[in-house]
Amino acid sequence: MTAQGGASGVGIEQSSTDPALRAGKGFSHFFGMNDLVEASVQTNFDTGLAPADNHSFTGTVQIQNRGPDGEIQSDFTIDFGVIGGTVQDIVDELNANLGATATASITSNGAIEISNAAGYENYNLNVSSDTSDRGGTGLTFSSMFGMGLRYPIDQSADFTVREDILASPMTMALAQVNAAGSPALNLSDNRGALDFQDLASATNSFGTLGGLPGSNVTLTEYASQILAKSGLDAARSESLQADRSALAGVLKDKLLESSGVNMDEELANLIVYQNAYNAAARVITTARDMYDVLLNIA
C-alpha cells in the first residue's frame, strides 16, 4: 500500500466490535504489514482454511510415522489428484493411513494437528518426499502445514527484530489510529507502547509442544517453563550419560575377564603343562628302557 502525497500515510484500524479475522489474526497481522519481529522461515502454520475449503494441491507427498528408535510404523503416499478436493479430504486420508496410532484433525485456525494415541506418544510424522504444489504458487503441502520434523525445529531458529527498527527504535509505530473524523494519529499517543508492554502480563493459551503440557499462562511464565524444562532435560542428560558411562565400564571389565590375559594365571598354567610334559617324558623313557632290556635278553 502506497499513500498519495508526502504528508499522507496508511493506517489500518482493527475493529473492536466486528474484527476481520483469519486464523485468529487481523488483516495486517495475517499479511505481515507491520511486523516487528521477522524470520527467514515459516513460523506459524495456522492457514485459516476451513475443512470444506478447497486444498488446491497437485502432486504427491510421502509421509512416514516414525518411532523414537527410528522404527517406521507406517509409510504412505497421498496423491492429491486422487483424493477429494477439500481440506477435510486430506485429514481423512491421513487418518485412513495412520490407523490407530494417531488422529489428524483441522483446528479452528486452519492448522493440521496430529494427536498420538496411547503407546505412541513419542512417534512423529516425517515427510520423506514432497512434490506437491498449491495452485502454482510453489508452496508445498508440508511447508504450508508444517508437516515433518524440520518445521517445528526451525520455527525459532532466527527470530530477529526488523533491521530498520533496530537501527532507529524511534521509528517503531507506538500510536493507535483514531476513529474517523478525528486526526488519524496524535504525536504524543503512546497507547500502542502501553499495549505492547501489557503483552508480558497478558494470559495466553499455549498448546502441548516440546514436552510441555498445554497451559494458559503469561509469556513470562511460559518462558520460565521453557527454561525450567531445559535445565531439567540437561540434568537428566548428564545423569544418563554418567549412568551409561558406568555401565560401559562394567561391561568392559566383564569383557576383559572373559577375553583378557592374566599373566600370573597363564604362567601357572605353563608350569602345570611343563610338569605334565616332564612326567610323560619320564614314562616314555622308562618304557623304552624296558623294551631295550627285554630285547637284549632275547
Image (spheres, rainbow, N blue to C red):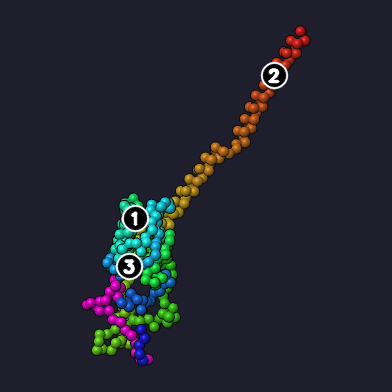
Give the residue at mark 3.
55
Which of the 4 quarters of the picture holds residue 186? Answer: bottom left
Q: In this view, does 297 lie to the left or right of 208?
A: right
Q: Work out how far the residue at label 1 is from the one at label 2, CA to CA, in angstroms.
A: 81 Å
Q: Is residue 52 left or right of residue 43?
A: left
Which amino acid type is marked by label 3? His
Which amino acid type is marked by label 2? Ile
Q: Nearer the viewer, residue 170 or 18?
A: 18
Highlighted magenta segment, given as a residue range: 6-26
- Element type at mark 3: loop
For the N terminus, the image quarter is bottom left
Give the residue at mark 1.
97
From what the image shows, is residue 198 above or below residue 59?
A: below
Q: Residue 284 carries which label?
A: 2
Residue 205 visible to the viewer: no
From what the image shows, is residue 1 above or below residue 297?
A: below
Estimate the x, y position of residue 251 in percent, counting from the top left.
Answer: 50, 43
Which amino acid type is marked by label 1? Asn
Going from the N terminus, do you reach mark 1 or mark 2 first? 1
Q: Work out how far the residue at label 2 is from the one at label 3, CA to CA, in angstroms.
A: 97 Å
